[in-house]
Image (spheres, rainbow, N blue to C red):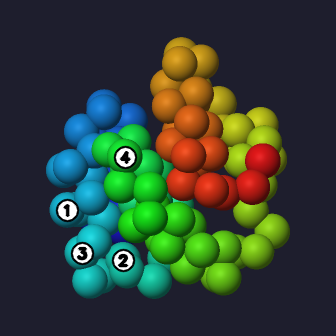
Amino acid sequence: WYHWFVGFVQYAAGLYEQAIATLRHDSIRGTGSRRILAASLAQLGRIDEARNEAAAFLAMVPSFRIRTWADAHPFKLDGDRQRFVDGYRMAGLPM
């Protein structure tokens, strides 16, 4: 879980390149961290790669919806939540 959480924090801090490197670690490759990897790629304009990761994530979690995720995850600052929502949306995850 270490790499998953580090990647999450890096994404939240806007450190997208670092998040990508962390979230590509073999120990978490087949986990839900792929949605954050997809968002990181999307934030850097790497849309094709982001959509591929989003599709792989959705194959594992077909019920994922951005709105459901956003409603279930409180953030102190709404802008922090919005950064995740925007990345997920740009990566092609469903609202």
SS assignment at label 1: helix
Q: Residues within 10 Å of mark 1 (few under 14, many from 20)?
A: few
Give residue 45's mark: 4
Answer with left or right where residue 80 lies relative to residue 40: right
Circle nearer the viewer, 4 or 3? 4
Tell me how far mark 2 sits from mark 1, CA to CA: 12 Å
Q: Residues within 10 Å of mark 3 (few under 14, many from 20)?
A: few
- The residue tagged 3 is 25
Earlier residue among tags 1 and 4: 1
- The residue tagged 1 is 21
Q: Residue at x 60, y 74 (%)?
A: 55
- The residue tagged 2 is 28
Amino acid at circle 3? His
Closer to the camera in the image, 78 or 5? 78
Tell me how far mark 2 sits from mark 4, CA to CA: 23 Å
Tell me how far mark 4 sits from mark 3, CA to CA: 21 Å
Q: Are marks 1 and 3 in contact (CB under 8 Å)?
A: no
Earlier residue among tags 2 and 4: 2
Residue 73: percent from left, percent from top:
66, 39
Q: Is residue 65 above or below residue 74?
A: below
Answer with left or right where residue 40 lies relative to residue 76: left
Q: Are marks 2 and 3 in contact (CB under 8 Å)?
A: yes
Q: Is residue 25 above or below residue 87?
A: below
* Quadrant assignment, res 91: bottom right
